[in-house]
Image (tube, rainbow, N blue to C red):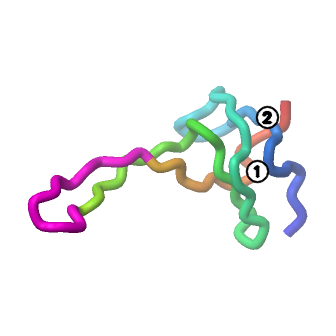
Amino acid sequence: MKLHIKKGDKVRVITGDDKGKEGTIVRVLPELGRVIIEGVNVMKKNIKPKKEGEKGTIVEVAMPMHASNVKKI
């Protein structure tokens, strides 16, 4: 799939929950037609403790978004 954007481009989200937010593309997944944008579409993920005695943590992870939902600015 040919995409109209590439890594490092500054984009604005045009649809969805994050509509109007801007960010820089961190990664492009052309086989899925998706992009990962810094600071946009962020979900919280629970990480289990690796060793006994450690505490689990909550990490924020940027999730992929379909490339048709963003436009280059």
**Above or below: residue 34 compared with residue 20:** below
Specify the label residue 10 is tagged with. Answer: 2
At x 16%, y 57%, the residue is: 54
Q: Residue furthest left?
A: 53
Identify residue type, mark 2. Answer: Lys
Horizontal placement of 19 versus 12: left or right? left
At x 53%, y 37%, the residue is: 17
Residue 7 colored in magenta in the image:
no
Image: magenta residue range:
49-60
Horizontal placement of 68 versus 5: left or right? left
At x 79%, y 34%, the residue is: 10
Total tally of numbered discs in the picture: 2
User: Of discs 2 and 1, which sits in the foreground?
Assistant: 2
At x 70%, y 55%, the residue is: 27
Q: Quadrant of residue 71?
A: top right
Q: Which residue is mark 1?
A: 68
**Above or below: residue 14 compared with residue 46:** above
| Secondary structure predominantly adopted by residues drawn in magenta | loop
Q: Quadrant of the N terminus?
A: bottom right
Q: Residues within 10 Å of mark 1 (few under 14, many from 20)?
A: some
